[in-house]
Image: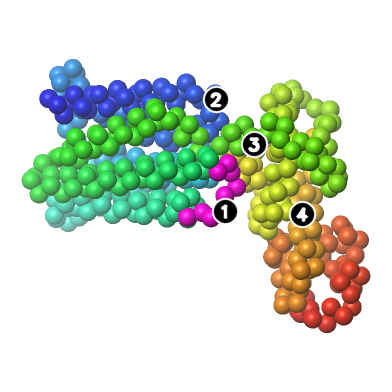
Amino acid sequence: MLEALLFLFTGIIGMVTMGLMITSYKSNQFFNIFLMLIFVITSIRFLIHGSYELGLQIQLNPRIGYISILYLAVVPLFYLYYKSLVHGEGTFNFNSLKHFIFIVALYLINVIPLIRDSFLFYYGLLTNVFMMTLFIGFYIWKIYNLLSINLWNKTHIEVNCTHYNLVKKWTIYLFTLNTLSVIGVLTSFYIESFLGMPLSGKYMAIGLLLFWLFIYFKILISPEILYGLPILNKKLLILNNMETDQVSTSIEVNNSWELEPSNQKNRQDLKLHENIKSNIIGYVKRVDELSSEQFVFRNSKISVGEVASKLGVPTSHIVYLFKYHSKMTFSEYRMNSRIQDAIHLMMDGFLKMNTLEALAYKTGFSSYNPFFSAFKKITGLSPQEYLKTKIGVGSINHIKKEV
């Protein structure tokens, strides 16, 4: 009776948490579909168990059939959720479906008599337990690697420190509960298989339900954790007119930006302008910092979308920034940043131990030829001519010449 009531209560709390996420959709730009799917699956399962055990409904029997195998979907969904937290990719796409192939395959081999009665199930239910253990263990390992590399052990952060610490603590809290839940579920599976009971993971149900209540209540108490690492620009860029004069001066010096936009061409751009006009200076400052201090353009595949992700803002904001506030296109800005980076490396003696071709790769070019063309286009000189003019002939003798 107590267990059934706890199932029902946990399911109701899960529904309340889902309601919070849905009602905050418009204000939460990084609304996460993966976490929503996790809550949908778990809450419905808890409600079915609780209502059936209490006699509130008899149509849905949670103990019949192999449909419970499909509940394993929460395992890869948690991985996709953590991935979206650290990379800001909160949308479901066809590429995400590959994570559910095993679950579908496991379900099919259990419902197809020819396969279920074959040698694969020589050990009966233990076969399922073994395969599920490998599957869950694999994703726990993937999640741990993802979080430890990209979040927990990160020494340099590109986002608001307060929110970074909030997300870090949340992922540690959630991953700990995930791990304890996995231990509980697998223990239940092994006990149920040895006792010849249907595999349901309910043998340690009370402990598992308490873990889920901890997760639901944590979100209800601290809903800001739903924003993820690349948070809303209003949370990330705390401008409040701080250092406005100083930033404006730097913008005038590099002469790459225009604070007053040119005429917007369409209604969508006009609407976007109203949303981000107060943050333009902050965007400009942060883009220049990514270029000159964090050297993001050394990544040969960097795109406007990745720049937006590092800033924690929608791609449309950065597209708008370069469309109306930059004197260069994004491609031109990227090329110019790489050449300026190359010049600084040359002045710092990079070529004393490296070739010009190595310099091209270092600054993000795919080969020496596009580097040469870009360098001459921006400086008016070839790299060799620039070295002779700016550094001096004497220094040229120390430079490797393999190009």
Callout 2 secondary element: loop
Residue type at tag 1: His
User: Could you tell me the amino acid type at mark 2?
Assistant: Ser
Q: Which mark is residue 156?
A: 1
**Residue 178 higher or lower than 372, as above or below:** above
| Residue 18 x %, y % | 39, 25
Whether residue 154 is in magenta: the answer is: yes
Which image quadrant for residue 368?
bottom right
Residue 173 % position (x, y) = 37, 42
**Cα distance in 3D space between marks 1 and 2:** 28 Å
- In the rendered structure, the answer to whether residue 371 lies left or right of residue 142 reads right
Secondary structure under badge 1?
Answer: loop
Q: Where does the image place residue 249, in percent across and percent down from the top left?
A: 83, 42
To which residue does mark 3 refer?
Answer: 237
- For marks 3 and 4, the one nearer the N-term is 3
Quadrant of the snapshot with the C terminus: bottom right
Q: Residue furthest left?
A: 195
**Segment colored magenta:** 153-161
Secondary structure of the residue carrying tag 4 is: helix
- The question of residue 131 being in magenta is answered with no
> Quick one: label 2 or label 4, which is nearer the N terminus?
2
Q: Residue at x 31, y 34 (%)?
A: 214
Rendering coords of residue 139 (x, y %):
36, 51
**Structural crowding at the residue carrying mark 2, measured as other residues with C-alpha within 10 Å and reported as few (<14), some (14–19) or many (≥20):** few
Does label 2 or label 3 sit earlier along the sequence? 2
Q: Based on the displayed image, in which of its 4 quarters is residue 371 positioned?
A: bottom right
Q: Is residue 306 left or right of residue 274?
A: left
The residue shown at (68%, 26%) is 275
- Rounded to the nearest angstrom, the CA distance separating label 1 from label 4 is 21 Å
